[in-house]
Every structure is written in C-alpha cells, then in structure tokens.
Image (cartoon, rainbow, N blue to C red):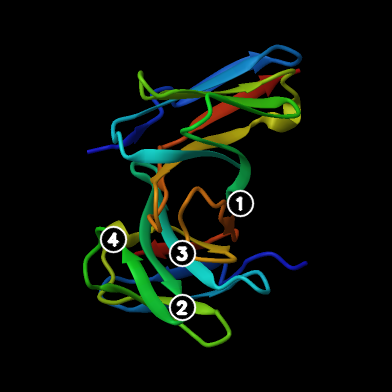
Amino acid sequence: KAGVTQTPRYLIKTRGQQVTLSCSPISGHRSVSWYQQTPGQGLQFLFEYFSETQRNKGNFPGRFSGRQFSNSRSEMNVSTLELGDSALYLCASSPDRAGYGQPQHFGDGTRLSIL
Amino acid sequence: DQQVKQNSPSLSVQEGRISILNCDYTNSMFDYFLWYKKYPAEGPTFLISISSIKDKNEDGRFTVFLNKSAKHLSLHIVPSQPGDSAVYFCAASASGNTPLVFGKGTRLSVIA
C-alpha cells in the first residue's frame, strides 16, 4: 500500500512569491492535515481537510491556505512568501476525521527555502 | 505558550540499556497521547499511543507511561538499539476532532 506522497520534495523561492505544495494521501484516507516544522517551533498544525472542507485551522496568517479535491488529494498554498516561511511542510492522512487519538500517517515532507 | 513540552533536546544511551524520553503537558483537556519517531529526510512514523483511561501501554520494546496527576508521560525503550537513533516527538489531543499538538522533539542517540 503506497504511503502519503508529497511533491515536490524541495523548493527554493524568493520573498514575495507564492508556492503550491501537493499531497496525495494513502488510498482510502479521507482526512488530510498539514503541519509546518521549523527548528525553533517543532511541528505546528496548519489545517485539516475532510470531504473537501476545511475542518480545523491552526494559528497561521491568511497567507496560508489549502484545498482538498474529490479524490482526497490536497494542496497547500502560501502567498507573499516571507523568509520565516522557510520550513519543512508535512502532510498527514488518516481514514476519518483527525482526532480521538487516531494516528496520522505522514509523508516525507516538502522542504521550502526562501531566499 | 507550549502545551506539550519535551525538555530534553537530546539524549545519549548505550546499546542494550533503557532509553527514557519524557514529555510534560499543560492542557488538562488532553485525553490522547502519541509518540512518533522521525529519521532524517523522512516523515514522522507513529510508534505508540495511550489514552487517559490507562496509565501504561506496551508494544514490544516500547512502553508508554502516563501520570495524569503530574501531567507527565514517558516513553521507555528496552533494550535500546542503534536503529532507534532518531528524533522522538510527543503529541497530544483533546477528545473530539481536535488536532494533534506536538512537542519540539528529543533526539535520541543509541551508541553501540
């Protein structure tokens, strides 16, 4: 069974640009959550999508947005990139809505570097 | 304000000995606790979990202990193996469809 797939693995952008990251969940998984990992802050929750609807949102500015398609694949978009957006962005999937201690399955992440 | 704290950024243990990784939390609403392991250039992998109705959960070499009154949990690895060298994240969530809150991780090095 294929795992969670994130593309691209690495991205280099400059300040002010925008970027779109992609995540394909494990087949049959309907929930996709996004996290940002930085050395100083650890893993921080961005948002969760389930049935093409955003269900939960973390404490991030509106520059961070996402969407989910009918096949459960998800994209995350960051506009007007800032140097502080440099991070590893992780996607995680689960069969149902995240919560109740249900383990999530993570992809290997997209490393975003802002110059 | 960090709700899940892993106060030891790193830990070194000899092969064959016990590794104990600690985690403290502040939110009394947390009911579920999970441990993840992360190798470089890979995503976190789920290891073991425990709910607040239990104080211990065991899976092979891995045991998680929960002390609700102290808001503290620990992961024990016995015996430790070189392949256990990784960053370990503690995560917690409240009941309901609430997201996981992660600690900053502890880097475990198991020395042969």
- Marked residue chain, label 3: A
Q: Mark 2 or mark 4: which is in front?
A: 2
Q: Is residue A90 visible?
A: yes
Q: Classify mark 3: helix, strand or loop.
A: strand
Residue B40 in sight from this viewpoint: no
Q: Are marks 3 and 4 on the same chain?
A: yes
* Circle 1/circle 4 CB separation < 8 Å: no
Distance CA(mark 2)–CA(mark 3)? 10 Å
Residue drawn at (61%, 51%), measured in percent from left and top? B41
Helix, strand or loop for disc 1: loop
* Figure check: A90 above or below B107: below
Residue visible at 55% across and 79% down in the picture: A73
Quadrant in which the N terminus of chain B appears:
top left
Badges 2 and 3, same chain: yes
Disc 1 vs disc 3: which is toward the camera? Answer: 3
Q: Which mark is residue A33?
A: 3
The residue at which mark 2 appears reads as A75
Q: Share a chain, discs 2 and 4?
A: yes
